[in-house]
Every structure is written in C-alpha cells, then in structure tokens.
Amino acid sequence: MIRTKRIYEAPDGEDGFRILVERLWPRGVRKERAAVDLWMRDAGASPALRKWFGHDPAKWEEFEDKYFHELSEKPEVIDQLAMLAREHPLITFLFAAKDKEHNNAVALKKYLDMRGELG
C-alpha cells in the first residue's frame, strides 16, 4: 500500500517506510525531523518539467503525461520501488508541494498503480 503525505507534516506510526520523491530537498526541513528512510531524487520530475508545471492545476493532465514519459525512461527507479513495495507493506511517498492533489508523489503513485508495479 502506498500513501502520499507532505513532508512538512509530522511523521507518525502510520507512515511505514518513508520515501522522499522530490529532486530537491524541501526548504526549511531538517533531515533529522523529516524521518526519511530513503530519498529517491530520480523519482522526482525533471527540473524543466517542474518549472513548466509551476504547480498549476490547469496543467495537471499534461504534467502527468510528461512525467509518466520521464518515468518510463527510468526503469531502474520503477524496479527499485517495486522491490521496496515487496519488502514494506506500507510506503509513504513524501512531497513538498502545498497542493495535496497535484504533485509528483500523487502522479508517481498513479503511474505505479496503472502499471501494476506494486502488486
């Protein structure tokens, strides 16, 4: 099972294995407080795609398409996530965006669900 959560929210026992799926470390978050088990920079959207998207919900569907294309070119990232899902019954993808519905963690979870990568 995969959940998504803002990294600015306090960690809790419901998070399971916590994976930061951002290319950049979030501003103002101390590594000790973040309780990140793994930082997967390569699971984040490219700098160019992040800049283009600009967290504009009107661009969400096109962002997903472009991000899914980027992910399709990173089979090692998908393989690592599938392996982690086999090892951990609960995974939380951590993201920095204020918008809890339009961010790369939500899109990554959707991509993996569509592909059936996580069982």
Image: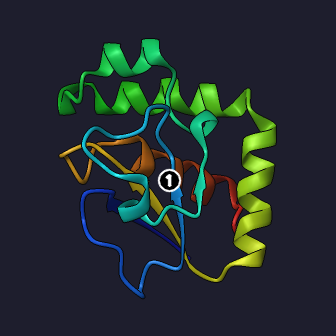
Q: Where is residue 35 in the image (x, y as percent from the top left)?
A: 45, 66
Q: Can you say whether 92 is above or below 63 in the image?
A: below
Would residue 76 be visible to someone looking at this image? yes
Question: Does residue 28 appear left or right of residue 90 in this picture?
Answer: left
Residue shown at the point (38%, 22%) measured from the top left: 50
Q: Which image quarter: residue 112? A: bottom right
Pick the residue in front: 61 or 105.
105
User: Residue at the spot x=64%, y=34% of the render?
Assistant: 71
Residue 119 seen from this side: no
| Mark 1 surroundings within 10 Å by alpha-carbon count, few (fewer than 14), some (14 through 19), many (20 or more) | some
Q: Which quadrant is home to the C terminus?
A: bottom right
Return the residue at label 1. Answer: 110
In the rendered image, residue 32, in percent from the top left (x then y), is placed at: 42, 61
Q: Which residue is drawn at 81% across and 40% down?
A: 76
Residue 9 image offset from top left, x and y in percent:
24, 65
Q: How many labels does the image show?
A: 1
Q: Is mark 1 on a helix, strand or loop?
A: helix
The amino acid pointed to by label 1 is Lys
View extreme (bottom): residue: 13
Q: Report whether 81 appears left or right of 83.
A: left
**For residue 63, which quarter of the picture?**
top left
Q: Nearer the viewer, residue 86 or 113?
A: 86
Residue 46: percent from left, percent from top: 51, 21
